Amino acid sequence: MVNHVAKRAGYPDKAPAFSVVVGQIHAGKSKDLVAENEGYGWGNEPLKIYYKKRPDQQYGSVFWNYERNLEKKNPNRKDISYQVWGNSWLNSENPGEAGIALNETFSYEVNVYENIMYLTFSNKRHGTVNFEINLADNIDANGDIDVLDHPVGYSGDVLYFKAGAYDQCSIKDDPGFWYPKCLGTGDWKTDKKNGDYAQVTFLRLETGLGEKPLK
């Protein structure tokens, strides 16, 4: 369950504002790999699971993003967002009861078997939502070819899994997409009082080898 997301942002219309990442797959950064095989080793993320709730809304949204596996300076290196409950990250409309409230439990399963990433999201009110995407090509989770992505995806990368609370509300004041100029100070007592923090509770965390899904 997500207990809290940052309440204040200098640039509230930037997509990362008011959001926290609760799970992800991250590719390793490797200068040697970049030099040997252009397109690998950039340290991109084929999976970021988000929760986002604006301060004037009762419910937040759960969605996941796939980052195109391109070099950092490539303008096409962007996140492609897939809605689970509520809205995707570029939609600021109120999700209402279609979303997930703070302190409402939900679960996710990330199962990478061979080249396929299988995602399962579950919630008592909304039921189960499934996705799958091949991480070794440029076909998106809707089955469409993404001509802007790396043609063989992340197939040459080392990948590692992460679960936790990764606050997306950077305090940096910068015109860049990722910098919503949030108002945290780094002092816990001050930030907690002002609502400038993120908090997530994991009730259970299980790890294991990827398995071929039963269909």
Image (cartoon, rainbow, N blue to C red):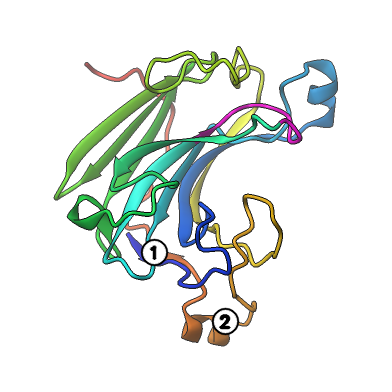
Determine which residue is flagged by label 1: 54
Q: Does the magenta portion include 67?
A: yes
Q: Which residue lies under the disc numbered 2?
A: 188
Q: Is residue 214 left or right of residue 124?
A: right
Q: Secondary structure at mark 2?
A: helix
Which span is picked out in magenta? Answer: 66-74
- Compare residues 90 and 20 and report the one nearer the observer: 90
Please provide percent x and percent y for residue 200: 41, 62
- The quadrant of the picture occupied by the C terminus is top left
Image coords of residue 54 (percent x, y): 39, 64
Kind of residue at badge 2 = Trp
Q: Position of residue 50 (x, y in %)?
A: 43, 49
- Asked whether the beta carbons under mark 2 and mark 1 sit within 8 Å of each other, the answer is no
- Whole-percent x and y of residue 166? 53, 56
Q: Where does the N terminus fall, quadrant-wise?
A: bottom left
For the question of whether residue 206 can be seen, the reply is no
Query: Which structural element holds mark 1?
Result: loop
